[in-house]
Amino acid sequence: MDSLKSSVGRILFRDEYIILKRFWVFPVMLWAGLVAASLVWNLSSVKQQSISTVRNQARAMFELIEMTRLWNSRHGGVYVPITETTPPNPYLNVPDREIITKEGKTFTLVNPAYMTRQISEIANEHDGTLFHITSLKPIRPANTPDEWESMALEGFEKTNNKEIFELIKTKSGNVFRYMSVLYVKKPCLRCHEIQGYKAGDIRGGISVTIKADPIIKSYRSSLDNIIALHVAVFLIVTALMLYTMSHRRNQFLTLQKVNVRLSDDMIVLQQMSDELREGEERFRLIAESVSDVIWTLDASMDSFTYISPSIADLRGFTVEEAFHETFEEALTPESYAYVRDTLTQKIECFRESGDIDCFSERIEVEQRCKDGRIIPVEVVISAITNAEGDVKEFVGISRDITQRKKEENKLKYSSTHDSMTGLYNRAFFDAELGRISKGGQFPVSFIVADLDGLKRVNDSIGHEAGDQLIRGAASVLNMAFRGSDVVARTGGDEFIIILKETDEALSAKSIERVRAYQAQFNEKNDGLPVSISLGVATAHRAGDIESAIKEADKRMYDDKVSRKQQRTG
């Protein structure tokens, strides 16, 4: 209880800043700082990206002009028709500057510089972009560099930096200016060798001027969007933070109110826990003192969750050894299949009816002991369910019924066997006739046997001698017939043998076999000789059974009379 109060106190102290509203400003300030940092970083990134985009655009234009110039110079210039916009270049002093075709049409030679000027005029008309080829030693006066270009060219001469890019404010607006160096290539020497240049020297450069105002406008629009997005995110998240803290505050205030009731409930719960512990201790003492084995099994019917110490008396295992067995291993395969099917059916019954009595079941199984013996065990199984009505675990009580099974087998044996001879009795014989009538196995032969002279021996020598004579007849009959044949004593000196799936020919041989074993018995036995009268008949269907037995009985009496006449004749 003290531990619970301490835990609740720590929780309340840890979240005190939520309960007191004056502390709410700190997470809001932290969030504002994060949003501000993100805004600064994004604004800087957009600015750098915009500048980089324009620089790359200007660099691409320069490289395109440079490749075009190289193509022109490698071809020694190109001839184009003379027009108002393309007059002969007065600064190009080379042979064949103009040529006349056979048709009388005049063409003028356009060198790289002339071509660059014309491309610049087209670009300026298209989007206001200007290209200017310039040099510190220009041939054409119009190629003289302006102040910015002169500074860039001088920088190229003095440093390893071979390009420059800047945003410049002019009277007509803001512009981006880019300039990169032009090197003298071998084809360029045709025109510039007279100026003292050689291949690889810096000839000059090409400046690219791009209007900046549209780009700046787009950049500022992006900045406005980023600022608006950050403001919106800040306000939304701040509102969520304030709502969450307000909701959490209400929860803790409610918790404070519940805390007193919780303390009282914990006291009651502690008392219940003590009572439960005492109940568990009583159960443990009872389980450990009774001779029956008490056990619990998980709902999956796989593992034991408790086994009482009486398992040592039942199967020879310690509790630890028994715990290492699964439920399947604790039973013989046939018993495990039977128990699992039974419990599955009980679970279905419980799910349909909700009646816990569905699990009240007393069943008999077989279990293997530690020494290898298999013993019969009676098991009573019930179940424990949870609040949802699902089976939580099974509870069982196991009892050794070895002695009871022995007594039951004795009773069963005595109910079907003659106590004097060990042969089947009249009750078993009648039951077997019923089974044969329903089950077939025809033809069925019946041998009726009658012990000769029993009354005379009983009257003259005594019943003990008569009983000995009856046991001798039983021995003869047991030796003469198969284990699957039914040999029954149906009266004091009367016996009937049932031979399944035996016709007349085979049954006649059985009569001869009885005679042979009778002679053998009398030869080895010093007591009174055994003499048995025999009669046989065969039934080929159920309706013939009664008449066949009567016929066998008649033939037995005929045999008795015949043998008596032989002895007296």
Image: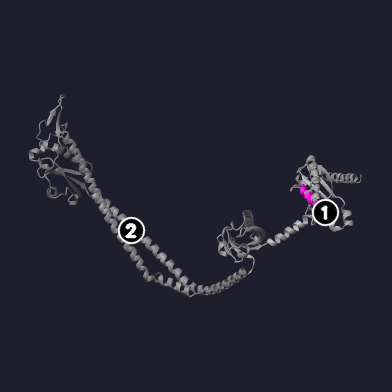
Residue 415 occupies which quadrant of the picture? bottom right
| Scheme of image coloration | one colour
Where is residue 129 drawn, in percent x and y? 21, 44
In terms of depth relative to the viewer, which is nearer, 12 or 489? 489
- Res. 430 visible in picture: no
Name the N-terminal-most of marks 2 and 1.
2
Q: Where residue 252 appears, x then y in whole percent?
A: 45, 70
Residues 25 and 526: in front is 526
* Picture disc at residue 527: 1
Q: Which residue is mark 2?
A: 230
Local crowd at mark 1 within 10 Å, few (<14), some, or many (≥20)? few
Residue 540 included in the magenta stretch of the image: no
Q: Which mark is residue 402?
A: none
Q: Which residues are magenta?
A: 468-481
Q: Residue furthest top?
A: 102
Name the quadrant containing residue 10: bottom left
Residue depicted at x 21% and y 45%: 59
Name the chief secondary structure element in magenta: helix
Three-letter amino acid code at disc 1? Answer: Gly
Disc 2 residue type?
His
Q: Residues within 10 Å of mark 2 (few under 14, many from 20)?
A: some
The answer to whether 430 is drawn above or below residue 294 in the figure is: above
Left of 20 or right of it: where is 163?
A: left
Q: Which of 204/186 is in front?
A: 186
Residues 536 and 88: in front is 536
Residue drawn at point x = 43 percent, y = 70 percent:
11
Spatial separation of the CA atoms under disc 2 and disc 1: 124 Å
